[in-house]
Image: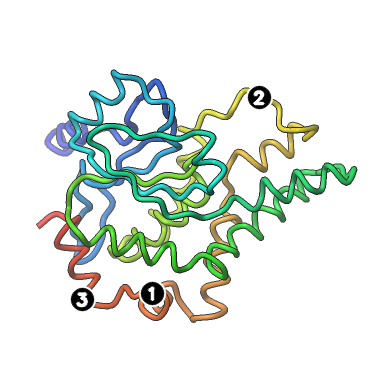
Amino acid sequence: MQLNHDLLMERPARQVSLSGASNFRDLGGYQGLDGRRLQWGKLYRSAHLAHLTQDDLQQLQTLGINRSADFRGEDESNNYAYAWPRIARNALVVEPTVIQRAHSLMEQGHHMSAGDTQELMHDTYRSFVNVYGYRFAQFFTLLQRSDEPLVFHCTAGKDRTGWAAALLLTALGVNEEQIMEDYLLTNQYFKRPTHVFGTLSEEALDALWRVQPSYLMASVDTVRAQHASVDRYLTEVLGVDSAARERLADLYLEA
């Protein structure tokens, strides 16, 4: 019992604490194919990286992170651009339709309730499947190029990043319980923006900035309705066949 406690204490920290980015965390330790766990220090997920400090950059350099996958839309990337030395940015554009639609509704005088916001979030997650599948296929192509440490992110690191993480963990054999556990950690690690978003109520803001199981399940249910399972979707649409899974396992799972 003491040995297990010691091993637990030696496990790397899930969260990487940075001054200029929140929701930055390591995907290591989750149990995947054949009981093998994801390696620590290889795959990270985060909110955007535009506000990193020099100390933050030094920390990422120490971690060996030299490439990023950026799921932000064009305006997001232009407004909060980054071009950090030693980090090769790969743009995988997925437009943030929930923000655009919420702005449009409010400009028309519509009062956005928490329920309205939740439904916009559900529609957004369905769009990841129905509109942007090719971007997530490109993500898997990037992952298979090498095992150099990579961080993938959007603006808040919760929705587009959350779906990417769910797909990746599924491909590596992680079970649904652990995937949902990782997804919901955003509510612990994401620091909400301090500016007020239009005239949204506190309940609607919670629906916008926090994650809920039903959000991720909107993507999952869409996939299951169209392809029977996330595994089949990975193979049939994203091109993550058995050879690709073996490649990913060799790169990111413990031996």
Answer with left or right where residue 27 lies relative to residue 124.
left
- The secondary structure type at the circle numbered 3 is helix
Image quadrant where residue 137 sits: bottom left
Q: Amino acid at mark 1?
A: Asp
Q: Amino acid at mark 2?
A: His
Residue name at image x 23 percent, y 40 percent: 66
Answer with left or right where residue 157 lies relative to residue 208.
left
Is the C-beta separation of discs 3 and 2 under 8 Å? no
- The secondary structure type at the circle numbered 2 is loop
Residue name at image x 51 percent, y 39 percent: 78
Residue name at image x 84 percent, y 42 percent: 107
Q: CA distance from mark 3 to mark 1?
A: 14 Å
Q: CA distance from mark 1 to mark 2?
A: 40 Å
Which residue position holds label 1? 231
Residue 239: give x, y in percent of width and height: 34, 75
Q: Which mark is residue 184?
A: none
Q: Tell me which numbered mark, 1 or 2, is placed earlier along the sequence.
A: 2
| Label 2 packing within 10 angstroms: few (<14), some (14-19), many (20+) | few
- The secondary structure type at the circle numbered 1 is helix
Residue 64: give x, y in percent of width and height: 18, 36
Which residue position holds label 3? 243
Q: Residue furthest left?
A: 255
Answer with left or right where residue 248 lies relative to residue 169.
left
Image quadrant where residue 68 sits: top left
> Relative to 75, does residue 194 appear above or below in the rendering?
above
Residue name at image x 48 percent, y 54 percent: 93
Q: In the picture, which quadrant includes the C terminus?
A: bottom left
Residue 158: give x, y in percent of width and height: 50, 45
Which residue position holds label 2? 195
Q: Tell me which numbered mark, 3 or 2, is placed earlier along the sequence.
A: 2
